Image: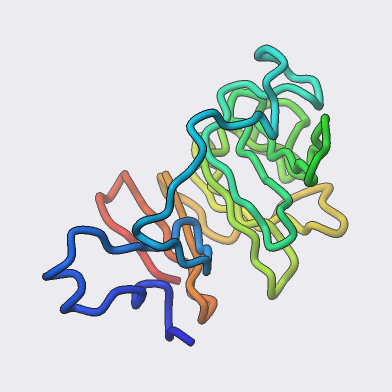
Amino acid sequence: MRKNSFETCSVAEKLYYKYCVYPLGGSSIDIHPNARWQQNGITVAGGNREDNGTNQLSSPWDLYVDDDQTIYVADTANHRIVEWKWGATSGQVVAGGNGQGSGDHQLSSPLDMIVDKESDSLIISDYANRRVVRWSRRNGTSGETIISNINCLGLTMDENGSLYVVDTGKDEVRRY
């Protein structure tokens, strides 16, 4: 087992091979460098015109796929995170969705999210509010600000539970 998600390739592999695989979004799935995908994908979330219905998205920015193939989408222009179960034709709002705002029950242009399995919650980059929030997946009526005054464009968590946050305002990546 790797110590963290940054050890997928050795130093030698990075120097001598053209392709080196790095898991995205905290994923622990190793993808073979010769993997091939179908040329015509299928729609698994949204695809029903841009709007705010539970089967629609507006400016989806990022996604996270959980171990059970549940897809979480940062529905940025609708200021919400939408969960799409495998095979579903509609999603369920699991964070935000109460209009744009800075209240504990609101999001403003969420750009990225991950699932924190330890706390069974979503950790969300709430970009326009300049904060990172934790939102329970069990009773998610509001979020808790865990980092404030940050221009968080993206985040991930390693296998040790350390949270890494891209702060575009300070041109740095921070570990918490």
Res 121 quadrant in image: bottom right
Q: Position of residue 83 (x, y in %)?
A: 75, 43
Q: Is residue 1 above or below residue 8?
A: below
Q: Residue at x 72, y 71 (%)?
A: 119
Measuring 28% from the left and 63% from the top, which residue is drawn there? 20
Q: Residue furthest left?
A: 15
> Relative to 21, is 158 above or below?
below
Left or right position of 84 against 76: right
| Side of 1 where 92 appears, left or right | right
Q: Is residue 74 above or below residue 35?
A: above
Q: Nearer the viewer, residue 7 or 133?
A: 7
The picture places residue 49, in percent across and down from the top left corner, at 68, 12
Residue 41 horizontal side relative to residue 81, left or right: left
Asked which colour scheme the image uses, the reply is rainbow
Q: Residue at x 57, y 29 (%)?
A: 60
Q: Position of residue 76 (x, y in %)?
A: 58, 30
The residue at 60%/23% (across/down) is 77
> Where, by quadrant of the figure, is residue 90 drawn?
top right
Q: In the rendered picture of this protein, how many numbered marks are placed on residues?
A: 0
Q: Which of the 4 image quadrants contains residue 78?
A: top right
Task: Give the answer, above or below, for where 31 lies relative to 161.
Answer: above
| Residue closer to the observer: 148 or 119 | 119
Check the picture and name the quadrant holding the C terminus.
bottom left
